Amino acid sequence: MNVHKIKLAVYSLLLTNYYGFKLKKIQEPLEKKRVRLNYAETLLAKLNISVEVKNREKITPDKQYLLISNHRGIIDPLIVELALKETTLYGLWISKKELYNSPFFGLFVRNGGAILLDREKNQMGGFFSEVKSEVQKGNSIFIFPEGTRNKSEALLIEFKEGFRIIALKNRLPILPVYIRTHTDKVLGKALKNKNLQQTVTIEIGDEIDYKEKEVLQKVYKEIFNI
C-alpha cells in the first residue's frame, strides 16, 4: 500500500464518520439529503472524480420512486446522490447487514437514511413494514437490484426480483439509472495516482410502471442498450 493510498484511507474513514455523527442529529429528510450530498461532493473531489449526468430531465423532481441502479464500486451511492442534486428527491438506501454493521461505513449508513435487509431472517414482514412506513412519509427507496457488487467483467449480474415487491406493494414507479463507468476501476486508479482527473458517467432512464409485466432486468437492459 503506497503512502497516497494510506492517506486517502485515513481521510475517508475520518470524513465518513464525521458525517455519520453529523447525520445522527438530523431528522428532516431534505437536510439529510443536503448533508449526504455535501459528503459525496467532498469525498469525490478529494479523489479527483467528477460526475457527468445524462438525461437528468427524465427525473420528476418532487416525485417518489423506487430507484434502481447497477453496482460495481463502493462509490456508487455517491454517484447516485450527485445525479439527484437538482431534485428534492430523498430516498433511503436498502442496506445489507454487512454494510449496516461495518466499522468503516456503519455509522454513516445507519444515520444517513437506510433500511436494513437481513437475508438471514426467515420472515421479511418487518422489512416491508419499514419500507411502507418510509414511503408513506413521502420518501423514495433506493436499491441495487443485483444484490451485491458486480465483481465480474459482465456489465450486469442477475437481478434479485424481490425488489419488484417493493414497487408493487407501495405503488412506486421505478426510476432506472445506469452508471456507465466502471467505478471500481476508477477508484483503483484514484488510489494509485493522486493527480489523475477522472469522470464517471451516470445515465437516467425512462420511468418504468410498477405494474410492468416484463422481466425487469430485460426492460432495464433495453432502456440502456446493454
Image: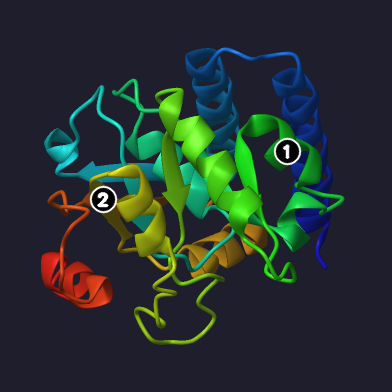
Corner quadrant of residue 181: bottom left
The residue lying at 15 percent from left, 70 percent from top is 213
Q: For the point 56% across and 71% down, which residue is it?
A: 148
- Residue 8 image point, x, y percent: 75, 48
Picture quarter containing residue 187? bottom right
**Left or right: 33 as drawn, with respect to 174:** right
Q: Secondary structure at mark 1?
A: helix
Residue of label 1: 110
Q: Which mark is residue 180?
A: none
Where residue 95 appears, as percent x and y from the top left, is: 62, 53
Q: Nearer the viewer, residue 118 or 193?
A: 118
Residue picked out by circle 2: 174
> Position of 74 compared to 11: left or right?
left
Q: Earlier in the sequence, mark 2 or mark 1?
A: 1
Percent of width and height locating residue 191? 65, 59
**Can residue 197 be seen in this snapshot?**
no
Mark 1 crowd level (few <14, some 14–19, many ≥20, 10 Å Cα):
many
Does any portion of residue 72 appear in the rendered image? yes
* Quadrant placement of the C terminus: bottom left
- Which one is in front, 192 or 77? 77
Q: CA distance from mark 2 to mark 1?
A: 24 Å
**Disc 2 secondary structure class:** strand
- Towards the viewer: 72 or 10: 72
Q: Amino acid at mark 2?
A: Ile
Residue at 41 percent of width and 44 percent of height: 80
Q: Position of residue 85 (x, y in %)?
A: 36, 27
110 and 12: which is toward the camera: 110
Amino acid found under the numbered disc labelled 1: Arg
Q: Residue at x 42, y 68 (%)?
A: 182
